[in-house]
Amino acid sequence: MAFYIRTAGLTFRIEPNFSTIERYCAGYTCPADEAAINASVTLDEIEAERASAVKAALSEGRSAEFTQAQLEILTVHKKISEVIPKYGAFLFHGSAVEVDGEAYVFTAKSGTGKSTHAALWRKKFGERAVMINDDKPFILIRDGRAFACGSPWNGKHRLGSDLTVPVKAVYLLNRGNINKVYNIKKSEAFPSLYEQTYRPDDPGMLAKTLILLDKLASTAKLYRLYCNMQPEAADTAYEALEDRS
Amino acid sequence: MKLNREFVTHSTENEHITVATGKSSFTGMLRSNQTAGFIIEQLKHETTEEEIAAALFAEYDAPEDVIKRDVHAVIEKLRSIGAIDE
């Protein structure tokens, strides 16, 4: 039986092949909606995804054994990510946390420490901080503003919530012995932001993605953050927002 | 010659950007100044190196040999990332 999920301000209809995906999407399901976008995939599409899933897993040193049920989760995510630029959203690789109603997004190559840094923010702010999505938030552009959105696809620790929060700042993370933060211009940040943005297979969707990413980069504060894994790293990052110099 | 259909451009305030879809092996971002961006834009329809040089010569105040060299360099760069259909 089909089920419906809501993410990135949109509703998707999923006719599952395996029950795993419905459990995976728990917390994001919503009532049936005639206007929902179809995100169902066929067994052929699932198998077609296997090669790229294996390649990605090996590059990150993870197990490359996938059941079809696991691949269905990845394939549906890809299908959604392919179509959402049409509706003003795109998939971004990063950890997004909400503090006092605003979203802070930490982005970097896998293994740099995005999730670790987000965890430091949760420690610093306690209940004031809520994880939006620890790995792959959708970024929605609406009324000229960028919003970080929760989705079921939120990383191996499954940290996130069904939230849509205006983005205050994006931090490009680099490991460093000493915590340091620099305000950077859009032109400096853009290649790194693009590197962590999902590239659709369709040229039209890619063109839309660039326009949306440009909007994110134009409206959010942009920082390059060198950080270690000590609690002070979160202080350094957050204090940059106060610095008006 | 023409820009391969998997390649997409984007213009910001002072930069021209060329990227490729998930189907292409080129995962990077080619950042160009105004002149190189002009050359890439010419490749959105079927053209030749000579035609692009002529269009650039009409647009910019620069010696013809400099223009020809620039056009060639940009096209070679695009070729190296698989962005040119011959």
Image (cartoon, coloured by chain):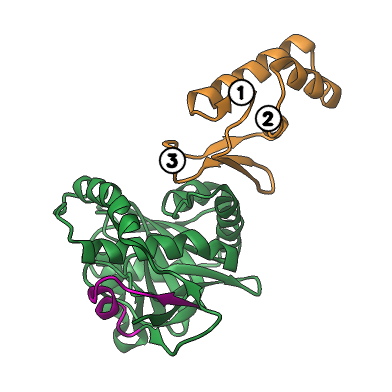
* Image quadrant occupied by the C terminus of chain A: bottom right
Which quarter of the figure is the N terminus of chain A placed in? bottom left
Q: Earlier in the sequence, mark 1 or mark 2?
A: 2
State the residue at coordinates (24%, 77%): A19
Say what secondary structure mark 1 lies in: helix
* Residue B77, visible in the rendered structure: yes
Q: Kindly identify the amino acid type of the residue bearing the numbered disc 1.
A: Val
Task: Using the image, determine if residue A36 lies above or below residue A61.
Answer: below
Magenta-tinted stretch: A11-27
Q: Which chain is green?
A: A
Residue A221 visible to an observer of this rendering? no
In 3D space, how far apart are the residues under numbered discs 1 and 2 (Cα atoms)?
11 Å
> Residue at label 2?
B43
- Report, in whole angstroms, how far the alpha carbon at label 2 lies from the one at label 3: 20 Å
Amino acid type, callout 3: Thr
Q: Colour of chain B?
A: orange
Tell me the subunit letter for badge 2. Answer: B
Looking at the image, residue B2 sits to the left or right of residue A112; the answer is: right
**Chain ID, mark 3:** B
Task: Determine crowd level at label 2: few under 14, some 14-19, many 20+ residues with C-alpha closer than 10 A.
Answer: many
Name the residue tied to disc 1.
B74
Marks 1, 2: nearer the viewer? 2
Q: Are marks 1 and 3 on the same chain?
A: yes
Front: mark 2 or 3: 2
Image coordinates of residue A186 in percent, x first then y, are: 57, 53
Please state which amino acid type lies under the numbered disc 2.
Leu
In the image shown, does B49 or B64 lie closer to the viewer? B49
Residue at 27 percent across and 47 percent down: it is A51
Which chain is mark 1 on? Answer: B
